[in-house]
Image: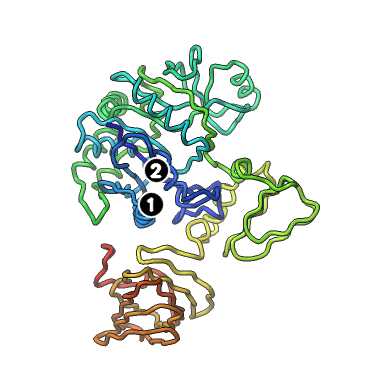
């Protein structure tokens, strides 16, 4: 049976400032579709006979991934959490071990959680074709039929490319310069490397053991030491940290003599930059792609995204302008691939805008840090119906909560009370307290913090529904 494996790690730095380390692009709705990139990766498989998906993600993103699967009603057998990033070869190995626990003949369909595929019906057809035609021992990758001499992708060389059949892979080649890429396009036997694969779980593990036994052994030890935590599978942290970091391409596909490629022409895009995102969205009459409150005049072929304020552009062409609540990016499309250089400068400066949005998501809901200054901070907190923050205390700050809408069940030391709209409560420094939404609608409240230190690490948890004690 086919087991979809969704690789949902990665930080998506090339789409900063919308994509951040704590909330990367795979969890965003970038194209205005029915869901986030992760959700659409799973739902486009509807109509293909498959088992419940296997999702692999970073531990930091576990509650986001779990919530997004719940939103679309997707069942799973546990989300595999990586305690640290080790690239795709180990991630797929862990998924193979999970699939084999329920199906000794499991076939893996490995998909990245952040790719756009416009023609989902054609994609499903090709997936089914690959599953029907793949022979024992073959490791199949999906190669994208190139539409231009692109320099942002690696290429797969075949001997004599034929559509709708599995082609023997001659070689994998790195991202080329423009002249070389044009030569590949003219040759006609090269495909873009999509990073999507299909192979049996047993065959993948066997090839990994053959070519990278160090990775296979570390993953096996990590899997043997796994523990179930709520809906998550926590692998052995120390064993996994000892695993080398390597992509499936380098570890297996380039080393095996059983690599085959199936051409894929389905409107694929890996959305690897702001300019590539602009290319797949519908423009206005002036070629501008606009998202949010935007006014333009005498401007053409721009991409503008704004979250919370009016953005205007005048007399400019070929720009990317992205406004979030705490950061603004302005670049021309030619340099859009180099956004990571800005992110590196942010990290070097000791700032946090590469990692967190102003809005931060938690398993119980989210909060928006609206204002901050010396010894104070103001947040707007949203708690989902039935959700509860941990029982906690703070050593360095007091808090004042004002309910804006909904109902709040509040505990302060030994006293418990129910607050309605426009009612408030004071949490003294050092008091043990908790907040719960007992109602049927989201709870909205304003929190005013005051004290000598207001960092998120000034939390001592005593009880927590989400295992964060």
**Residue at 55% across, 29% down:** 175
Percent position of residue 391, x then y: 28, 74
Q: Of all residues shown, which one is farthest toward the top?
A: 160
Q: Which residue is mark 2?
A: 42
Q: Is residue 273 above or below residue 416?
A: above
Q: Is residue 39 above or below residue 259?
A: below
Task: Classify mark 1: residues with Cα within 10 Å, few (<14), some (14-19) or many (20+).
Answer: few
Which labelled disc corresponds to residue 113? none
| Residue 294 appears left or right of 135 | right
Q: Which residue is mark 1?
A: 72
Helix, strand or loop under label 2: helix
Q: Decide which of 36, 346 is in the foreground and name it.
A: 36
Helix, strand or loop under label 1: loop
Percent position of residue 451, x then y: 43, 82
Q: Decide which of 84, 18 is in the foreground and name it.
A: 18
Quadrant of the image occupied by residue 60: bottom left
Work out which quarter of the rendered image holds the N terminus and state it.
Answer: top left
């Amino acid at each position: 049976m086919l087991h979809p494996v969704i690789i949902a790690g990665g930080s998506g730095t090339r789409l900063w400032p919308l994509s951040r380390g704590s909330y990367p692009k795979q969890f965003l709705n970038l194209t205005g579709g029915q869901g986030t990139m992760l959700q659409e990766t799973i739902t486009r498989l509807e109509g293909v006979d498959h088992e419940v998906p296997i999702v692999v993600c970073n531990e930091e993103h576990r509650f986001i991934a779990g919530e997004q699967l719940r939103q679309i009603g997707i069942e799973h057998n546990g989300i595999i959490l990586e305690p640290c990033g080790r690239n795709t070869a180990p991630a797929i190995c862990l998924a193979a071990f999970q699939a084999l626990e329920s199906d000794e003949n499991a076939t893996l369909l490995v998909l990245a959680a952040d790719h756009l595929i416009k023609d989902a019906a054609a994609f499903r057809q090709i997936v089914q074709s690959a599953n029907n035609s793949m022979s024992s021992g073959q490791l199949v990758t999906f190669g994208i039929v190139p539409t231009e001499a692109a320099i942002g992708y690696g290429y797969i060389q075949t001997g004599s490319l034929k559509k709708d059949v599995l082609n023997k892979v001659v070689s994998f080649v790195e991202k080329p310069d423009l002249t070389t890429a044009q030569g590949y396009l003219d040759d006609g036997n090269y495909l873009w490397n999509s990073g999507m694969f299909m192979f049996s779980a047993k065959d993948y593990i066997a090839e990994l053991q053959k070519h990278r036994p160090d990775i296979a052994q570390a993953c096996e030890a990590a899997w043997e030491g796994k523990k179930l935590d709520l809906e998550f599978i926590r692998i052995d942290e120390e064993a996994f940290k000892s695993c080398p970091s390597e992509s499936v391409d380098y570890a297996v596909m380039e080393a095996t003599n059983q690599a085959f490629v199936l051409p894929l022409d389905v409107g694929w895009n890996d959305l690897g930059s702001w300019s590539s995102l602009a290319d797949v969205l519908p423009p206005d009459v002036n070629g501008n792609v606009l998202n949010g409150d935007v006014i333009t005049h005498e401007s053409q072929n721009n991409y503008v995204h704004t979250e919370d304020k009016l953005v205007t552009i005048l007399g400019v062409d070929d720009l990317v302008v992205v406004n979030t609540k705490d950061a603004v990016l302005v670049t021309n499309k030619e340099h859009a691939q180099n956004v990571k250089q800005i992110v590196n400068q942010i990290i070097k400066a000791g700032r946090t805008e590469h990692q967190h949005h102003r809005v931060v998501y938690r398993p119980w809901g989210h909060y928006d840090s609206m204002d901050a200054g010396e010894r104070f901070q103001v947040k707007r907190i949203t708690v989902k119906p039935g959700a509860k923050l941990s029982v906690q205390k703070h050593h360095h700050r007091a808090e004042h909560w004002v309910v804006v809408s909904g109902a709040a069940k509040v505990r302060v030391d030994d006293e418990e009370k129910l607050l309605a709209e426009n009612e408030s409560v004071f949490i003294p420094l050092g008091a043990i307290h908790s907040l719960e939404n007992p109602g049927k609608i989201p709870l909205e409240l304003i929190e005013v913090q005051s004290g000598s230190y207001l960092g998120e690490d000034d939390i001592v948890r005593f009880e927590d529904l989400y295992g964060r004690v």
